[in-house]
Amino acid sequence: MRLTLIQPRQNFLYDFAHQERPLSLAQAQTGVREMEEQTFALMEQAPAADLVVTTEAVNFPGLEKQLPVPYGELIREEPLLSRFAAFAKARHCYVAAGHYARDGKGVRNRLTVFDRQGTVAAVYDKVHLAGDEQRSLVAGDRYCVLEADFGRVGLCICWDMQFPEVCRHYALSGARLVICPTWGWESIYAHARAYENGIFVAGAMSVPYKEAIAGIRTPSEVVAPDGCVVAQAAPDAAQQLTMELELNAMEELHTLRMHDRRPETYGMLARWQ
């Protein structure tokens, strides 16, 4: 299968070093539109693929404490989702779209996957919320495997990758690829998750505001079941990263990681609170 990761450049909404700066309603709306249009421009320029993955929360309006109105009032899912659906149908591909969503309980950090006909094939709400998300968003409580025509794909978002149980759950569920839309791709965790489960892991990162990625964070990348990076985007540019994957490659590594497990000894992992 052919995988494309969309890597946009963040704008002033993501200037987390200056969280004390208030945003007007017009500024927030302008920033959201900029990120949405940049994402679709990158998608339109990308080569044909079986699965296109955006970064997380394409319609992020800024931090709740910076905004003049209640957070939920700025979350608009339409026409955003209709555009993703139309793209999936027109390109005959799957699209994994990261976005903020509203439901009866509040705002969620969501990944909606559209199939080749443009219909919703899977929905995942971020389970592990980080930092300000814990005050502004509602966490999900289940994991989700996409049953695609090219294989099973596990869905997670950003901070989820920090927790080994997530990818282990997906590996045991038959997934051979885990995708992770993110703003903070920390490669040390992704490499470990791929290696310890014998699966592919792919992160769609957004380039930080005003600077190149540095330190533990890395650009969008695909990691093979042996823990090695097989494709990586630039650290300072908006772009698409496309590559061919054989999801059953290195299957012996997955078998090796799973074969000698002793689930009967792992009870504390499930019981601990």
Image (spheres, grey):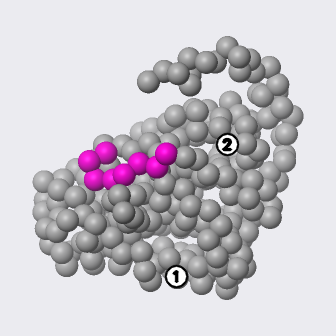
Q: Would you call the spot at circle 1 few (<14 residues within 10 Å), some (14-19), or many (20 or more)? A: few
Going 62% across and 62% down the picture, which residue do you hit?
122
Question: Does the magenta portion include 135?
Answer: yes
Question: Does the magenta portion include 270?
Answer: no
The main secondary structure of the magenta stretch is: loop
Does dot 2 land on a helix, a strand or a loop? helix
Going 47% across and 59% down the picture, which residue do you hit?
110
Magenta residues span 134-141
**Residue 212 appearing in the image:** no
Q: Amino acid at mark 2?
A: Tyr
Q: Amino acid at mark 1?
A: Ser
The residue tagged 2 is 170
How far apart marks 1 and 2 lie (CA) works out to 28 Å
The residue tagged 1 is 82
Q: Position of residue 146 (x, y in %)?
A: 68, 57
Q: Position of residue 121 (x, y in %)?
A: 65, 67
Mark before the other along the chain sequence, 1 or 2: 1
Q: Quadrant of the C terminus?
A: top left
For this rendering, which residue is in front, 153 or 263? Answer: 263
Q: Position of residue 82 (x, y in %)?
A: 52, 82
Q: Residue furthest top?
A: 265
